[in-house]
Image: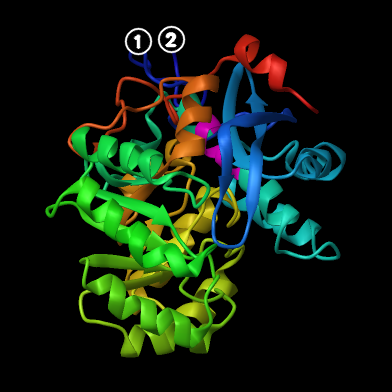
Amino acid sequence: MEDARSGTARPPGAPQFANGDGPNIENVSASAYRIPTDAHESDGTFEWDSTTMVLVEATAGDVTGVGFTYADEATATLIHESLRKVVSGVDAMDIPRAWIAMVQSIRNLGRPGISSMAISGIDNALWDLKARLLNLPLVKLLGAARDALPIYGSGGFTSYTDGKLCEQLGGWVQQGIPRVKMKIGRESQRDVDRVSVARQAIGADAELFVDANGAYSRKQALKFAHEFSEMDVSWFEEPVSSDDLEGLRLIRDQGPPGMDIAAGEYGYDETYFRRMLDAGAVDVLQADATRCAGITGFLMTDTLCQAAHLWLSSHCGPSMHLHAGCAAKRMLHAEYFHDHVRIENMLFDGVAEPIDGTLKPDLSRPGHGLEFKRADAEKFRIH
């Protein structure tokens, strides 16, 4: 086989587009699936009984890339009615060109919310597509900074009984995951007792994280921070609203030593993250590639963290963060969130399993390494 431009022979098995001139993006499609939770769930400020995943498939030539976002069904409508037309015809190698075109196209809709989640789904699919066209695992296309991604088990919902809380958190520690997170804030008068119960369940050596989802006032949060520190809580996520940058900074400055203040999961663009960092509001910035305009936006956030000399942690969607997280230079760890771990194992082949508290990309599989189980997903389809 010869390279069309140079006339030189291409080695057998080499990617067809290794010289960089890829085919154009021919089609982008979106479908939505609503998956019931395995139990009623709640945190400090919200309750839910299902999760919606929007799947995006992008095709160029005879190759299809897959991405997804956890978002409302309306996200799939926006992709179908508008964004797929914006990226159609763009060279599949030129992801920045497609990303810029999408961001410009939603000017009148607003960047936060559904628009950024729709962009996220497409961007994630385009990265998978490009890596598949080049026959590379995505982490090799992005450039690895590490071989494996540390994770923390995340769940511990406020709707859980103490017994179920202990079973879930303790189970992760027994699996070799050395850090776990629980929800607090719905019944503040019970929070200290629940955290104490969790600490006893996981033992003295595992790290214990708490997440209030913005449920506390500033003074409440500061009081609880000192009480939680007595149980060696090392991570306090959204002690106050993530919009209260002064409040986050107050808890960070006056809270106990050794307790990281974290927030950022609701960030949709780089301006949001920069404001949070400029305010000195967090020790660890969180970002979500299913919300912050995809892997492209996620890696932009990593660059901001490099400039601020702070750590980055990914929010939810562990399968969508595995390769990007191994490429991000300031990555601390990834959230191994109960709902999304369950959904990703139900709907995809190739989902990584924890090994010694980490996830490792499968370098034998191109792209994200995920294959959508369409027949299994069909019963959950709503769009």
Would you say the residues marked 2 and 1 are in contact, meaning their CB atoms lie under 8 Å apart? yes
x 24%, y 55%: residue:
199
Instruction: Name the mark on residue 271.
Output: none
Identify the mark nearer the N-term, 2 or 1: 2
Q: Disc 1 residue type?
A: Pro
Give how far apart the Cα atoms at labels 2 and 1 are. Answer: 8 Å
Q: Quadrant of residue 366?
A: top left
Report helix, strand or loop for mark 2. Answer: loop
Q: Please give the range of residues in magenta.
A: 123-129
Q: Is residue 266 magenta?
A: no
The front one of 382 and 108 is 382
Report whether residue 125 is seen: no
Residue bearing the label numbered 2: 1
Q: Is residue 295 above or below residue 38?
A: below
Residue 305 location (% of width, % of height): 37, 70
x 43%, y 63%: residue:
190
What main secondary structure does the magenta stretch of the protein show? Answer: helix
The front one of 68 and 199 is 199
The front one of 232 and 262 is 232
Report helix, strand or loop for mark 1. Answer: loop
Q: Quadrant of residue 354?
A: top left
Residue bearing the label numbered 1: 12
* Horizontal relation, residue 112 to residue 177: left or right: right
* Horizontal relation, residue 310 to residue 271: left or right: left
